[in-house]
Amino acid sequence: MGAEGEESVVASEGPRRIHIKPGVVGRPEFVLQPLSLFTASKPAKLLTKIHDKWYDLTEFERHHPGGPVALGLARGRDATVMFESHHPFTNRKILDAILAKYEIDASDCKHLETLEQQHGIPEHSFEWPSAFGEALKFQVKEYFEGEAKRRNVSLREATKATPARWTEIAILGAMFLSTFPGFFRGDWRFLFLFPLTAWLVGVNTFHDATHFALTNNWRWNALIPYVYPFFSSPFVWYHQHNIGHHSYPNIGTRDPDVLHHYWMKREHKDVKWLPEHKYQSKWWYIIFWWSVAVEFGLTTMEDLWMLQSNLYNEVVPMMSISGVRRIVHILGRVITITFIHVWPFVWCDSWVKAATFSIVPYLFFSILFMMNTQINHLLPHTAHVEDKDWYKHQVITAQDFGVGSKFCHLFSGGLNYQVIHHLFPTVNHCHLPQLQPIVARLCEKYDVGYTTAKGYVDAIVLYHQHSVSLAKKVEYVE
Ligand SMILES: [Zn+2]
């Protein structure tokens, strides 16, 4: 926090970090502070830091073309990476002119601290601008300008879901809804069909919507994830995925995705080795881990931990919300979990069947989620590399798989083009196969290590190798 008596950037006055620093000790000290669940102060001004300058965007919140949800992610943070990665095709002069209008005089910023500074989270910055990044943006923009002209839509519209994509989404949605009667009748065939179609419709909508990449209408992008809350609460997801993971992939002190339940599974060398980690070299442990991760991690424990500590996985400070909003959030999670787990006991005629329908579908759903999300970054050649150039960093810390495969594209909701997605997160994944050759060509030209795996099997084997290497006791190096 700032010096005594000084005004803080963000009104959040929640508890300071109570967990241990990643890599220093292995197990978190979990101290429930119930009061923190309901104590939150009034929303503060929308102050944000971009390229070392502070801006007051409170007035701009109503006018931001991407909507207030997107802008709200920047509140109180150093939002340099989100600013750069969310405006790849916007005219720079316009962006600079808007920022200049809201810049806070340097003499008034001395006492300001970002949320990360308040929580003592180590800083991590990249170097801008990037020649590689500029070339990427130029060529990809050229592609979308051609698409916009061909389809007679705006450039922005051209980057979102196409009519063909919406047709696919409608078909997937209809497939998911058509499993409801069978599932709720207790028809055994739907034990796996229900979570399978739930996965397909979710991965092809939720992820793009939370990246503001589904439609040009920010309201739909904001609403749709709340209609489909099975992965996690959208509010928590913005913290984990948009703010943390996408800005700092595989940075041990900033990427929450390398710190999920790290006393059970070690994904990064910055996490101190524990005896329990030796099990992660076994396939059975990986399958166990994958089957419980969404259930006990994303949808429950990590959610609860964030609410009570004001930090997601200890590295992403939570935005300030009102006490009412916290209660609504908790109610939303309770309703979702009840729908998934308690509902079968209402309609099933036997306890065994009810227990099976309560537990198995979500375990299977979790495996589908993990097998599509863990094999893109957590690999021997991507886990511990970094580059000061943000665009290069996105390329070398991820891997594409099944390039050209329509099955991989649909089944992973475009996550198989992970590198392209990380470079252009606001682009709908239906366009990623067309962008892949552009990115691959430029990576070759700029000598950036772009890697691909053949398909799911190759990628999963690489993920296993990564797990094996971190199962071994290796001393933590500062
Ligand atoms: Zn993403």
Image (cartoon, rainbow, N blue to C red):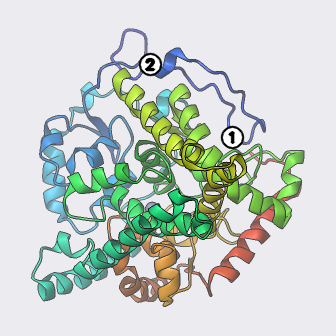
Q: In this orientation, which residue lies closer to the viewer: 100 or 267?
A: 267
Local secondary structure at mark 1: loop
Disc 1: residue Cβ within 8 A of ligand 1's nearest atom: no
Q: Position of residue 367 (x, y in %)?
A: 65, 63
Residue 175 is left or right of residue 44, and the answer is right
Q: CA distance from mark 1 to mark 2?
A: 27 Å
**Classed neighbour count for the residue bearing mark 1: other residues with Cα under 10 Å, few (<14), some (14–19), many (≥20):** many
Indicate which disc, 1 or 2, sits on the residue closer to the N terminus: 1
Say which amino acid is labelled 1. Answer: Pro
Residue under pointer 2? 38
Residue 137 is left or right of residue 153, and the answer is right
Measured along the vertical axis of the image, is residue 339 above or below residue 189? above
Residue 161 figure quarter:
bottom left
Local secondary structure at mark 2: helix
Decide if residue 444 is in sight here.
no
Within the displayed image, which quadrant is ligand 1 positioned in?
bottom left
Q: Which mark is residue 22?
A: 1
Q: Position of residue 3 (x, y in %)?
A: 43, 15
